[in-house]
Structure formats: structure tokens, C-alpha cells
Amino acid sequence: MSVYAFSGTHVLCDIVGIAAERITDNELILEAIRKGIEASGAELCGVQTKEFEPVGVTAVFVLAESHVSVHTYPEQGSLFLDAFTCGTRCDPQRIVDVVLEALGPCEHRTSVLSRGEPVRVLASAGYAA
């Protein structure tokens, strides 16, 4: 069995029950992600955002170590947050923690995936190994 020379941690978070004044505040959400990136030890390279009318935002933060994305659903008081960093120097969970703190009382489900681990190939589907 070979061991991959790369690894990373992918944190996925579904957040619901966010107060209307917070889920509609795009700047609060984007600034929380920026602060979370800083707290995680990652290096921010750039940001692409799309703000919706009357409310809502989708954004992708490009990191030297990978990315963070957010998609808000203000009409449902919810958002999806995705933070992935390669290697072990950064902690993407810190990004999620800072965002949750900024959002105040809410409910969330967080999944943490270890990336780069060897996987068992079930079928090659015609791809060369």
C-alpha cells in the first residue's frame, strides 16, 4: 500500500437558525471568515464574492493552502461553510469556530474529513493507475 505525499483537512459546516440581523449582514460574515483565516494560520491570496439582491452572499477565499467558501440562505436563516487546508501547518477548524462565534446562537453540523489518505480502488472505470 502506498502512502500519499500530500494531506489536508476539510471542514464542512451546515449552520441553521441564524438570527435575521446576522445572516443578512454580508460584511459580518465575510469579516468573520477573514478573521478565521488569520486565526487558522493560513495565507489569504484573494477573494471572489457575489452579493445577491435583496440579501445573500456567495464567496470563495483562495488560500495559499487551498480555499474557504460560504453560501448564505438568508430567507432560511442558514449557510454552508467549507474550509480546506493542505498539510498540517493550518487549522481550518479555527475558521469555522470564528464564524460560529460571530453568528451568535445557532445550530450547526460539522464534518471533518482527512484528505490524501490512501483509498481502496473499487473499480478503475477505465482510468490508468
Image (tube, rainbow, N blue to C red):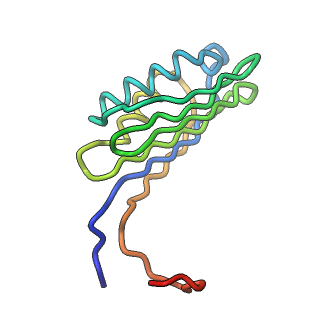
From this viewpoint, which residue is outermost toward the front?
128
Q: Nearer the viewer, residue 106 or 76?
A: 76
**Residue 10 to residue 48: above or below:** below
Q: Is residue 91 left or right of residue 22?
A: left
Could you tell me how many numbered marks the image carries?
Answer: 0
* Rendering coords of residue 74 (x, y %): 70, 25
For the N terminus, the quadrant is bottom left
Q: Is residue 22 left or right of residue 64?
A: right
**Residue 57 to residue 68: above or below:** above
* Rendering coords of residue 85 (x, y %): 36, 47
Q: Nearer the viewer, residue 47 or 109?
A: 47
Residue at (38% x, 41% y) in the render: 93
For the C terminus, the quadrant is bottom left
* Rendering coords of residue 9 (x, y %): 37, 52
Q: Nearer the viewer, residue 15 or 90?
A: 90
Residue at (59% x, 18% y) in the render: 26
* Rendering coords of residue 19 (x, y %): 63, 20
Q: Is residue 88 left or right of residue 19?
A: left
Residue at (25% x, 51% y) in the render: 88
* Residue 115 falls in image quadrant: bottom left
Q: Nearer the viewer, residue 48 or 114?
A: 48
**Residue 7 to residue 27: above or below:** below
